[in-house]
Image (spheres, helix red, strand yellow):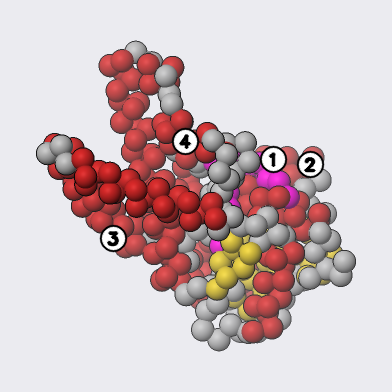
Amino acid sequence: MVPVYERVALIGLGLIASSMAHAMRRDGLAGEIVGYAKSAETRKIAREMGLCDVITDSAAEAVQDADLVVLCVPVGAMGTVAREIGPVLKPGATVSDVGSVKRNVIEAVGPHIPDGVHFIPAHPLAGTEHSGPRSGFAELFDDRYTIIVPVPGSDAEAVSRLTALWKGMGALVEEMDPEHHDLVLAVTSHTPHLIAYTMVGVADDLRRVTDSEVIKYSAAGFRDFTRIAASDPVMWRDVFLSNKEATLEILGRFTEELFALQRAIRQEDGDHLHDYFTRTRAIRRGIIEAGQDTDAPDFGRVKARQG
Ligand code: NAP
């Protein structure tokens, strides 16, 4: 296959970057892959694994002559990295990212991108609770959506090339504007993570009372919460700090619904509860019909990998 980009630089070598490296290699999508991560330890692991063709000791060195640079660092680090690489980017290159929040990343990165370099933000809706260079796998993006978020003036040719790369890595690609992206993700990912963190925190407090029964008898519902709540603390801290408005908006709605259900339980309003749970069951069916999860029991734990 003819590579989509001759030279790709991955900045940050965690779950998403390492999955991209594996997927690009699987499908021959990049002529050469160069990588950089902040710590010497991660760079050493990446070198030992042969994750990329070259691992450099600075971000500036990694992006030299790169046709595509993908920022795969936590959202709060995007601006710092962009400032470092801005002056050495190759004219005509594309800079993209994989951050879970878009408006904030656009504001942090955009000012550092020089004229003549295309900036095309993106977000693969795929992940696991694992992190680091060893956690990636080539199939992570298969049949999952990647949202491309072009900024005003984005070059159509550069957007279609980036789209071709993501499709080559197995993803389904759609475009969205940043505000819409951040609101949708607050509903589908960010707020559910916060709820999982809260539920596991509550159970942890309770554990002190019930002497480890919470772990011993942990049923599927709670176990799924603990899986989500095991996600990388730095990544999720940054997500909430940078998608503040949308998350608070959805949390406000969530709290209202929770109070309504609380009242229904107190008043023994079985009809309300039944109607509510019937509506939510239909949403689950819709997700399965859209091919975004499996109908296997136990939440398809073996096959489904959703970020
Ligand atoms: P990860 O596994 O924790 O890896 C993060 C990487 O970024 C590490 O290699 C880290 O290097 C590096 N890094 C941090 N600060 C840096 C800096 N200033 N300069 C250079 N490298 C730096 O994270 P991930 O899960 O791949 O997430 C990366 C991005 O993808 C985040 O923006 C996240 O929002 C987004 N995302 C994540 C998921 C998911 O489910 N995990 C899904 C979609 C999108 P060291 O190892 O040396 O510290």
Cα gap from disc 1 to disc 2, whole angstroms: 8 Å
Which residue corresponds to mark 1? 134
Mark 3: amino acid = Glu
Residue 279 at what x, y percent from top left?
34, 52
Identify the residue shown where x is 77% and y is 48%. Answer: 51
Q: Secondary structure at mark 2?
A: helix
Image side of residue 224 versus residue 72, left or right: left
**98 relative position to 224: left or right:** right
Q: What residue is pinned by disc 3?
A: 249
> Considering only order in the chain, which callout, 4 or 2, is on the residue closer to the N terminus?
2
User: Residue 149 vs residue 267: left or right?
Assistant: right
Q: Amino acid at mark 2?
A: Met
Residue 199 percent coordinates (x, y): 34, 35
Mark 2 and mark 3 lie on one chain; the one further toward the N terminus is 2
Magenta stretch in the rendered image: 123-138
* Amino acid identity at mark 1: Arg
Label 3 sits on a secondary structure element that is helix
On whether residue 54 falls in the magenta region, the answer is no
In terms of secondary structure, where does tag 1 sit? Answer: helix
Whole-Å distance between the Cαs marked 2 and 4?
Answer: 31 Å
Q: Marks 1 and 3: which is nearer the front?
A: 3
Q: Nearer the viewer, residue 186 or 54?
A: 186
Q: Tag on residue 265?
A: none
Is 17 placed above or below 207 here?
A: below
